[in-house]
Image: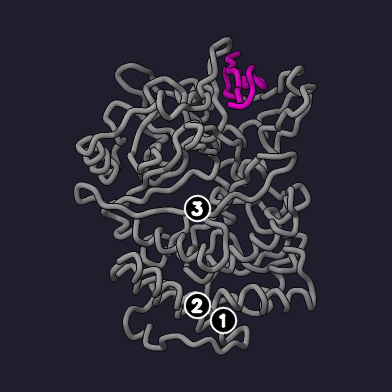
Amino acid sequence: MRELDIWLEAFDSPIGRLSSNDFYVLSFQYDSAYVDKPGSAALSLCLPLSKDAYGDADSRAYFANLLMEGKRLSDVCDGGEDRPPVDRDDIVGILDYLGRECPGAVSAVPVGSPPGKRPGVLAEDYVPISGDQLAADLRNLYQGKPAKPGTEVSLAGVQSKMAVTVAVDGTLMEPRSGCGAPTTHILKVGDNNHDAMVANEFLCVKLASALGLAAVDCAKFNHGGVEYLLVPRYDREVDYVAGTVRRIHQEDCCQALALPPRLKYEHYGDRKSGRIADFVRLFSLNTRMAMPADYRTALAKTCFFNFLIGNSDAHAKNFSLIHDGRRPRLAQLYDLLNVTMYPSNSQELSMRIGGSLDGLVAGKRKWDDVGMADWVAFLAIAGFRGANAQRFIERQFRPMAEKAIPELERLAKENGVRTPPTQQIMDCLCERIDRINKTLGWNISFDASYSDRRPLPYQSDK
């Protein structure tokens, strides 16, 4: 039996213990004193406070989602000169190596070890990143390598990125080695296979804010010929007056729904068993939110926004919850992209639009197949039925569609974003508005010549 202590930054002792046997079967159990302590927070909606142990399914769903994905996880599992390889199913073995730097406020360390994380002091715990070092880090990231050779960055996901801290004067810094202080921003770059990804995400995130959605306030820069996006971490509290940084506990919706990361896309799930990442399950979390009405409204509007911008990659791990009170709330939006710009990526929806309240009838997975009946069914799942669904469409969806094109034009001009990313996102918006004009009976104006400039790579097979 192998074990790790699990810590949350805000608490002065381990909150529980993660265990694994020789067959990689996991169990997690909260510390009984922690369960009885006033103000104790659950790790996840799928792991509510209890003195009973949780088995492999729930434990794996939460802790496996703390890991990076794809090639970056494979590189860790392959081992190196100073460490042996580890099986991808050996969550404890991977966390034994990476657990001090898990995303968020959680750390996993050998039993009896101090926590891997603590609040940071800006004047003491950070060192500036020099211009030459930043240029080298950016080049490595663009080439798909770790920012600094010989190190691994345990940020979840697949995109090339590194964690940094931004000083009050804008200087980029990094925590001193081993100090456990938090970073404040994620630095992201594109690559040769995803041209203009930085401009793409920048415009989409800014457009979300302009249309009334709560999104992170990202910024775009260029250093050493490599463009990068600087994204504030929504799970940080930075006090520049006091000079402190602390982490806020959060989880993604795969964790909240007790789904392993491989089920983040709906089509990999099992509808009959309910082990599936779909809008029925996402909206079912509503009753456990701090502000249920706000959660339902924000989630519904985000789905419509992703439809407008052609973001087919809005999977369950791209929705997160912040645990900063007795009940969680929806985190600010991030990872918003126009995916039609990359024809080799799937152009089908990560989560279907429409379906039935019981989740047994699937909605539409293809952009061109989504019509009025599907939006009404989708809103019924969200809790807006009958006349309320029609009012939601007119009062919430329509203003977003009407403002999308002029706001994109404004953002591109104000921020100096040139074509092709601006034009490609614009083409997608025009195609979507053309579609919803026909299906929802609207007459929103758009540039009808979009189809003559660049046909979208995906078309319905109906």
Residue depicted at 59% across the width and 44% down the height: 252
In this rendering, is residue 270 above or below 407?
Answer: above
Q: Give the image location of residue 281, x and y in percent.
A: 70, 53
Q: Give the image location of residue 20, x and y in percent.
A: 60, 20
Left/right placement of residue 330 relative to residue 163 reads: right
Q: In the image, which is nearer the foreground, mark 3 or mark 1?
A: 3
In this rendering, is residue 10 above or below 287?
Answer: above
Q: State the SS at label 2.
A: helix
Left/right placement of residue 265 relative to residue 285 reads: left
In this rendering, is residue 177 above or below 254?
Answer: above
How many numbered marks, from 0 up?
A: 3
Q: CA distance from mark 2 to mark 3?
A: 24 Å
- Amino acid carrying mark 1 in the image: Ile
Q: CA distance from mark 3 to mark 1?
A: 27 Å
- Amino acid carrying mark 3 in the image: Val
Residue depicted at 70% across the width and 28% down the height: 55
Left/right placement of residue 130 relative to residue 170 reads: left
- Amino acid carrying mark 2 in the image: Arg
Residue range highlighted in magenta: 1-25
Front-most of residues 368 and 127: 127
**Is residue 22 in the magenta section?**
yes
Q: Circle 2: is it few (<14), some (14-19), or many (20+) Cα within 10 Å?
A: some
**Label at residue 432:** 2
In the rendered image, which residue does mark 1 sit on?
436
Q: Is residue 294 visible?
A: yes
**Scheme of colours in the image:** one colour
Q: Give the image location of residue 355, x and y in percent.
A: 69, 67
For the N terminus, which image quadrant?
Answer: top right
Q: Circle 1: is it few (<14), some (14-19), or many (20+) Cα within 10 Å?
A: many
**Res 304 quadrant in image:** bottom right
- Mark 2 and mark 1 residues within 8 Å of each other at the beta carbon: yes
**Label at residue 216:** 3
